[in-house]
């Protein structure tokens, strides 16, 4: 049984991973919470507790441009990286907007799937 401190939301948002200011990988947010993310990527040249930067764009929000967050690597496996926002300086509003955006995206995808089920 998992003991999460904040609710996870499924993702599907492209993300860029930076190390020491240099882009090193692309990935996809697989799930997110206000405390961290899991990024699906084949990039593995990171250490636990290493600080990385993440860049992404909110869909359909051209006014905000790209957003960046810093995070610590807390897990690595063959499918990607688990990162945590604790202990790094981030804009809490950006994290909240990211989670809300993914929640909205997930509910829209769910409703679209339900609509397709009933029209076929």
Image (cartoon, rainbow, N blue to C red):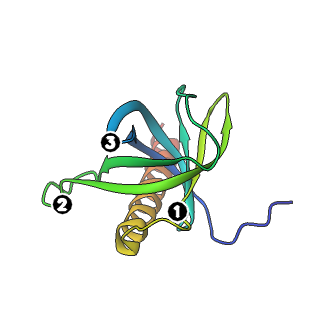
**Left or right: where 59 falls relative to 116:** left
Q: Which residue is mark 1?
A: 85
Q: Nearer the viewer, residue 63 or 115?
A: 63
Residue 47 x/y as whole percent: 61, 39
Against 85, residue 83 (above or below) is: above
Near mark 2 (Cα within 10 A), the count class, few <14, some 14-19 or many ≥20, is few
Q: Earlier in the sequence, mark 1 or mark 3?
A: 3
Identify the image quadrant of residue 84.
bottom right
Q: Residue at x 32, y 48 (%)?
A: 56
Identify the residue at image location x=27%, y=51%: 59
Q: CA distance from mark 1 to mark 2?
A: 21 Å
As measured in the structure, the alpha-carbon distance from the residue carrying label 3 to the one carrying label 2 is: 21 Å
Q: Is residue 63 left or right of residue 68?
A: left
Callout 1–callout 2 Cβ contact below 8 Å: no
- Disc 3 vs disc 2: Cβ atoms closer than 8 Å? no
Picture quarter with the N terminus: bottom right
Q: Which mark is residue 21?
A: 3
Examine the image and state in which quarter residue 81 appears.
top right
* N-term-proximal mark, 3 vs 2: 3
At a point 66% along the width and 38% down the height, the residue shown is: 76
């Amino acid at each position: 049984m998992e003991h999460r401190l904040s609710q996870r939301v499924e993702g599907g948002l492209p993300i860029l991973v930076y190390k020491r200011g240099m882009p090193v990988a692309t990935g996809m947010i697989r799930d997110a919470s206000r405390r961290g993310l899991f990024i699906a990527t084949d990039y593995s040249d990171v250490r636990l507790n290493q600080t990385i930067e993440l860049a992404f764009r909110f869909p359909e929000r051209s006014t905000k441009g790209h957003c960046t967050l810093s995070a610590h690597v807390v897990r690595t496996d063959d499918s990607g990286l688990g990162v945590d926002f604790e202990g790094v300086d981030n804009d809490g509003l950006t994290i909240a907007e990211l989670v809300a955006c993914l929640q909205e995206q997930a509910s829209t995808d769910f409703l679209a799937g339900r609509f397709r089920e009933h029209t076929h």
